[in-house]
Image (cartoon, coloured by chain):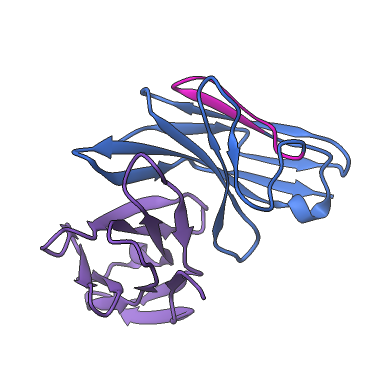
Chain colours: A blue, B purple
Amino acid sequence: SAVISQKPSRDICQRGTSLTIQCQVDSQVTMMFWYRQQPGQSLTLIATANQGSEATYESGFVIDKFPISRPNLTFSTLTVSNMSPEDSSIYLCSVGFFAQSSYNEQFFGPGTRLTVL
Amino acid sequence: AQKITQTQPGMFVQEKEAVTLDCTYDTSDQSYGLFWYKQPSSGEMIFLIYQGSYDEQNATEGRYSLNFQKARKSANLVISASQLGDSAMYFCAMREGSGGSNYKLTFGKGTLLTVNP
């Protein structure tokens, strides 16, 4: 397993501003992901954070809106840019482990609750 | 078509009884994995159990077991001896494709479980 921490745990922001969320893992992991959970909804993958290269974004998510960094194997950041109330969500960092040729574990951080006014 | 279907928006169970949470999936891949997560009101996503498509035996983790019926494309979660602390939202998720190419998790809409004393 892995211990994943996120900062901040919650924030209230004004529209038009940006917020950077940090994700720290206590061990080196190959795969790191960012998910979004809108109020009362399920989780949706925003992007895969690639170490040393640009993130891989899912359909509907773009780098200008959600720039991601991953400088090493234990840390990543997600920025929510030019925020609007529709960005109010829980943002979750997730890490995956690849064991015995089957990808059978994926863990989530505690999440960042973002409210945009 | 939805890839993960959870048909029970809400379920109630008496403390100490067993409960089954339904999950059906849709994929044409031969290799895939099925995950269950618990999300309490705090918002964190807690990994419960994993079943690989090639696993012949149903996965078990403590009080959690996964009733995997491949031909029916169902992966129901069984919680035995329910506890008050089991009250939470439960999500079923699927990873399609073999490791190394696709780590994306697709989530169902979730089932809200309430355990009554």
Please tell me whether residue A93 is drawn above or below residue A86 in the rendered image: above
**Residue placed farthest to the right in the image?**
A16
For the stretch drawn in magenta, what is the main secondary structure? Answer: strand
Q: Residue sitting at 50 percent across and 42 percent down? A: A110
Residue B47 location (% of width, % of height):
34, 51
Please tell me whether residue A78 is drawn above or below residue A43 in the rendered image: above
Q: Quadrant of residue B70?
A: bottom left
Q: Is B8 placed left or right of A89 in the picture?
A: left
Q: Quadrant of residue B64?
A: bottom left
Please tell me whether residue A68 is drawn above or below residue B114 in the rendered image: above
Out of B1 and B50, give the one closest to the viewer.
Answer: B1
Residue A103 location (% of width, % of height):
29, 44
Q: Quadrant of residue B7?
A: bottom left
Q: Residue sitting at 38 percent across and 55 percent down? A: B95
Out of B29 and A1, give the one closest to the viewer.
Answer: B29
Q: Residue sitting at 22 percent across and 40 percent down? A: A101
Placement of the C terminus of chain B among the 4 image quadrants: bottom left
The range drawn in magenta is A65-78
Residue A33 location (% of width, % of height):
51, 39
Q: Is A77 placed left or right of A28 in the picture?
A: right
Q: Is residue B22 magenta?
A: no
Q: Is residue A68 magenta?
A: yes
Residue B40, can we see it? Answer: no
Residue B76 location (% of width, % of height):
28, 73
Q: Is A78 placed left or right of A103 in the picture?
A: right
